[in-house]
Image: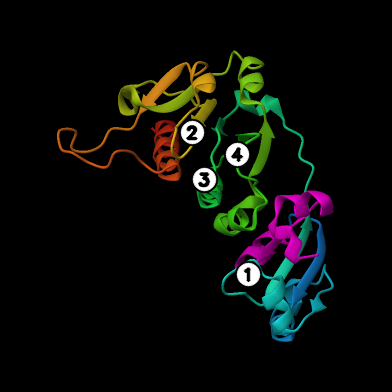
Amino acid sequence: MVASLGSTKGRREENCFVVEGTKCVMDTIHHFTCRYLLATSQWIEKYANDIIQVTPIEVKRTDMLRMSQLTTPTDVIAVYDIPNYILDSSRFNADLTIVLDKVQDPGNLGTIIRIADWFGINTIICSNDTVDVYNPKVVQATMGAISRVRVHYCDLIELINANKDIPVYGTFLDGDNMYNMDLSSRGFLVMGNEGQGISEEVGKLVTRRLFIPSYPTDVPTSESLNVSMATAIAVAEFRRRLMK
């Protein structure tokens, strides 16, 4: 069963997901309902005092190799129930909310979750066709931040139209210099697909188009930024404004 959780179909059927590696497991084990904790005898002996709320199942190294989603398997795998989060729209008026439009790369989503965690943003909203947050590669890339940041999926058009009083920011190559614009402490920050950027339908609802300028501005540079890098730069500028 554990090996099947590498697929979206398997996770939906079992309603659970996997976390691998000591750091990720120790960062998440107190935040999710643990269905199984599978570990080698050496790992159990070393971390017995840290997992007293869970009864681990001892497995052989060969079994870990078979179950692992990683190229180099670790000594511990946790299987958690997928939580049933309820979106609290009242938070939209209190803080910045990251909104992801068709982000496909698991590493990018995982990194964006880490960025949100670092900057104190605990809500991310994804389009229904964004990569699954419980994909093992996403979970691994979050390095435990998935336990503190709640990720929701919905129709972004409906979301934005239902919250017309919330500023909608988005990053575009033809936007206005972000550093010269007024930035609110609240709002939706929309980040788009790796290759296509923000979709045309969602882009029409963006009220404040941002551009992250290169430096120096008169020297040829890379064509664009990776979506997770762009997210980090944009969120850092929003947060910097609050620290003045």
Does dot 4 land on a helix, a strand or a loop? Answer: loop
Quarter location, residue 120: top right
Q: Position of residue 142 (x, y in %)?
A: 57, 54
Question: How many angstroms separate mark 2 from mark 4 (CA)?
Answer: 11 Å
Tell me the residue that label 3 is attached to: 112
Task: Check if mark 3's residue and mark 1's residue have beta carbons within 8 Å.
Answer: no
Task: Check if mark 2's residue and mark 3's residue have beta carbons within 8 Å.
Answer: yes
Question: What amino acid type is highlighted by mark number 3?
Answer: Ile
Which residue sits at x=18%, y=39%? 220
Boundaries of the magenta span: 1-29
Question: What amino acid type is highlighted by mark number 1?
Answer: Gly
Does dot 1 land on a helix, a strand or a loop? Answer: loop
Question: How many angstroms separate mark 3 from mark 1 (CA)?
Answer: 20 Å
Q: Within 10 angstroms of label 4, few (less than 14), some, or many (20 or more) residues?
A: many
Left or right of 94: which side holds 210? left
Tell me the residue that label 1 is attached to: 21
Q: Within 10 angstroms of label 2, few (less than 14), some, or many (20 or more) residues?
A: many
